Every structure is written in structure tokens, then in C-alpha cells.
């Protein structure tokens, strides 16, 4: 048995000296000390020894085991150190190399303006509604008092999918969806894309954005509308901003108005931004037409409401001093990076 131990010990030393990595070490450990290992087999055989011999052999076996364990640990440490050393050598850092710049993204300027508008209205208790961009003629025109043949359709020509399905020309269509789905009190805004078959120039695009607003409740007045728009204008264009309502016509509101804000650039004196007017038009609005209310199952004798539609590109151009609307859609990062 002593010979056997000596053999085991020698063969261990030999194997260990030829080991090159931590995996080898583990294999060796298993081969000698594992459940089916060589030394374990010797221990099992000890039952056959006499009571006298047993403790002596036991001690010998333990010595060999302690040596094996010690050697294994030492070798593992050496290998780890070598790996660390090699890593340090290969990972030299050249501090004279130019650094890598991580370019962080940001929101598109139009989205920045939308978020800003949303925050102003959320602050006044509005909820954000959503509606489809592919829309039925009914929601985009009919229900808004724009039947077939109505002249308002000429100014809002769009892309037709079928005779009755089109790309919406205005977010006002969402007013109808909201009023069909929910009874007053209603207080929503809806930002979104709209489409018109206009060709692209500095102030037109076949796709652009609007933000619709709708409030319906008992006793809602034009005064409420004006107050709301005043809060909006001051928040967006500065606390000095004044607004003015000019009578206008929209088929789905009565009365209707276009709203100008005093020029944020010159304060009303007249400059190139306001083309010498002192005022800049920013939105359309009015009191929801009683026929529109009844069509959605809301009794106009009991309820009244106001609505408004804000041009988002127009507002973003004003806010950022952008002169050509096309730049918002070209996605040239040299342009977008500035906002
Ligand atoms: N939808 C109109 C347009 O695209 C804008 C508008 C005007 C919306 C008056 C409204 C409103 O909600 O009351 O020209």
C-alpha cells in the first residue's frame, strides 16, 4: 500500500507539473481526490488492513492528501497570477489616443414642442386622447359639419384609401371619437399627425402635426376658451404675451376665431418674424357647434363646449427660429443637434 501511495504521489507531481491552466488543475483534483479518485480508492482499501497497521496507513494517506491539496492550491495561485500578468501586459492604455465620444440622442424638436404643450394642458387638468390617422370620411368631415361638396373640403384635400377612408386632414376628427366614447365632462387634448395633398415648400408639407383641444361640460363659455388660450400662450411664448381673437369660420364651431399672439420676437412693435404685424397667428378655435354635439349624443341644450387646433410645426418654427419647415423632416443630424 505504501508503494501504491508513492506511485500516486509521483504521478500527481508529474501531472501537476505539466498542467497549464485552471481547468487542468481541477481535472487533476478530481482524478486524485474526487469520489472516484486514486487516493479515495486507497482509503476504501484500508478496511482490509490490520487494526495495528490501519492508523499508520491512515496517517500516511492524510499526509499525501495534504500535500496534494497544498500543491494544487499553490499551482492554482501561480496560474492565476500568470493570467493576471498577461492581461496587464496586453491591456496597455495609450492615454494619448483620442477618446471615444458617446453621442447621446435627444427628442426631435417637434416632439420637444409637443411635450411642452402637453405639459401646459396637463397642468390645467386635461387628459391626452388618441385617434386613428387612417380615418373614415365621416369622422374627418361629415361629423364636423363638412358634408360632401362643402367648400371646406377643397382646402383640405387629402390621400384617399377608398371613397370613404382617408388620411385625416385634421386632429378635429378625434373630437368625434372622444364624444362618442365618453359623456361630459370632457377635457382632452390630442397631439398627432395629419395629412394633406399639398406639395412641400418652406411652409407646407403633406404631413404635419396638430394639437387638438376639446372641453365639453355644463356652462362652458367663450370666456373659458379665451382664458385657457391666454394661459397657454403665456406658458409657450412668455409671460408678457397677449392674445387676440379674430372672427373666423370653421364649420364645426360657432362662433369661431383665429387666435394671434403678440410677437415674441419684437413684443408687438413689428419685425421680420411677424412681418411687421406685431401679431402671429397660432391656432383656430371656437365653441363646439350644437349639431356636432347632438350628432355625438350630447344634448346641446344641457352642455356646451369649446375646441381649438394648434399648428405644431408653426409653433416649433417660432420657438426655434426655423424658417423652413422642411428641415424638420429631413432628419439631418447637423440640424437636429441644435435643439
Ligand atoms: N381643424 C382646423 C384646421 O385644421 C383647426 C381647428 C379650428 C381646430 C377650430 C379646432 C377648432 O378644434 O375649434 O384648420
Image (cartoon, rainbow, N blue to C red):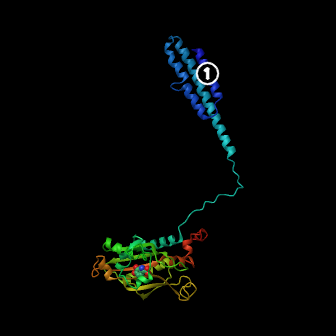
Q: State the count of labels.
A: 1
Q: What quarter of the picture does the N terminus occupy? A: top right
Kindly indicate the quadrant of the structure image that contains residue 222.
bottom left
Q: Relative to residue 241, is residue 181 depicted above or below?
A: above
Viewer-closest of 256 and 165: 165
Q: Is residue 117 left or right of residue 141?
A: right
Residue occupying the point 64% across, 33% down:
20
Residue occupying the point 52% across, 20% down:
41
Q: Is residue 86 left or right of residue 43?
A: right
Q: Relative to residue 173, is residue 23 depicted above or below?
A: above
Q: Is residue 86 visible?
A: yes
Tell me which image quadrant ligand 1 sits in.
Answer: bottom left
Can you identify the residue that label 1 sits on?
9
Q: Relative to residue 248, is residue 310 depicted above or below?
A: above
Kindly indicate the quadrant of the structure image that contains residue 65.
top right
Residue lying at the far front in this picture: please name it. Answer: 162
Residue lying at the far right in this picture: please name it. Answer: 96
Q: Is residue 100 left or right of residue 179?
A: right
Q: What quarter of the picture does the C terminus occupy? A: bottom right
Q: Is residue 125 visible?
A: no
Q: Is residue 119 left or right of residue 326?
A: left
Q: Position of residue 112 (x, y in %)?
A: 51, 70
Mark 1 beta carbon near ligand 1 (under 8 Å)? no
Kindly indicate the quadrant of the structure image that contains residue 321.
bottom right
Few, some or many residues within 10 Å of mark 1 (<14, 14–19, 20+): some
Q: Position of residue 27 (x, y in %)?
A: 57, 30
Residue occupying the point 44% across, 85% down:
258
Q: Position of residue 36 (x, y in %)?
A: 51, 24
Q: Position of residue 272 (x, y in %)?
A: 58, 85
Label 1 element class: helix
Amino acid at each position: 500500500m505504501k508503494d501504491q501511495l508513492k506511485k500516486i504521489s509521483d504521478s500527481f507531481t508529474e501531472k501537476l507539473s505539466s498542467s497549464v491552466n485552471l481547468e487542468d488543475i481541477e481535472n487533476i483534483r478530481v482524478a486524485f481526490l474526487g469520489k472516484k479518485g486514486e487516493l479515495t480508492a486507497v482509503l476504501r482499501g484500508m478496511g482490509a488492513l490490520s487494526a495495528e497497521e490501519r492508523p499508520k496507513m491512515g496517517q500516511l494517506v492524510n499526509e499525501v492528501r495534504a500535500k496534494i491539496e497544498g500543491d494544487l492550491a499553490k499551482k492554482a495561485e501561480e496560474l492565476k497570477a500568470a493570467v493576471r500578468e498577461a492581461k496587464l501586459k496586453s491591456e496597455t492604455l495609450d492615454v494619448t489616443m483620442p477618446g471615444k465620444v458617446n453621442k447621446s440622442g435627444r427628442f426631435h424638436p417637434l416632439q420637444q414642442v409637443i411635450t411642452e404643450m402637453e405639459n401646459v394642458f396637463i397642468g390645467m387638468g386635461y387628459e391626452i386622447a388618441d385617434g386613428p390617422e387612417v380615418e373614415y370620411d365621416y369622422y374627418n368631415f361629415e361629423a364636423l359639419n363638412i358634408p360632401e361638396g362643402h367648400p371646406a373640403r377643397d382646402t383640405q384635400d387629402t390621400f384617399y384609401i377608398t371613397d370613404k377612408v382617408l388620411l385625416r386632414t385634421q386632429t378635429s376628427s378625434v373630437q368625434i371619437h372622444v364624444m362618442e366614447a365618453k359623456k361630459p365632462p370632457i377635457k382632452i387634448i390630442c397631439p398627432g399627425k395629419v395629412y394633406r395633398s399639398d406639395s412641400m415648400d418652406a411652409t407646407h408639407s403633406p404631413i404635419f402635426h396638430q394639437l387638438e383641444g376639446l372641453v365639453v361640460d355644463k356652462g362652458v363659455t367663450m370666456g373659458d376658451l379665451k382664458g385657457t388660450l391666454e394661459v397657454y400662450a403665456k406658458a409657450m411664448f412668455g409671460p408678457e404675451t397677449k392674445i387676440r381673437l379674430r372672427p373666423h369660420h370653421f364649420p364645426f364651431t360657432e362662433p369661431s376665431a383665429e387666435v394671434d399672439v403678440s410677437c415674441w420676437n419684437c413684443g408687438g412693435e413689428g419685425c421680420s418674424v411677424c412681418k411687421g404685424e406685431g401679431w402671429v397667428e397660432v391656432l383656430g378655435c371656437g365653441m363646439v357647434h350644437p349639431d356636432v354635439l347632438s350628432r355625438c349624443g350630447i344634448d346641446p341644450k344641457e352642455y356646451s363646449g369649446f375646441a381649438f387646433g394648434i399648428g405644431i410645426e408653426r409653433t416649433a418654427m417660432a420657438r426655434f427660429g426655423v424658417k423652413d419647415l422642411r428641415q424638420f423632416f429631413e432628419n439631418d443630424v447637423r440640424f437636429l443637434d441644435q435643439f
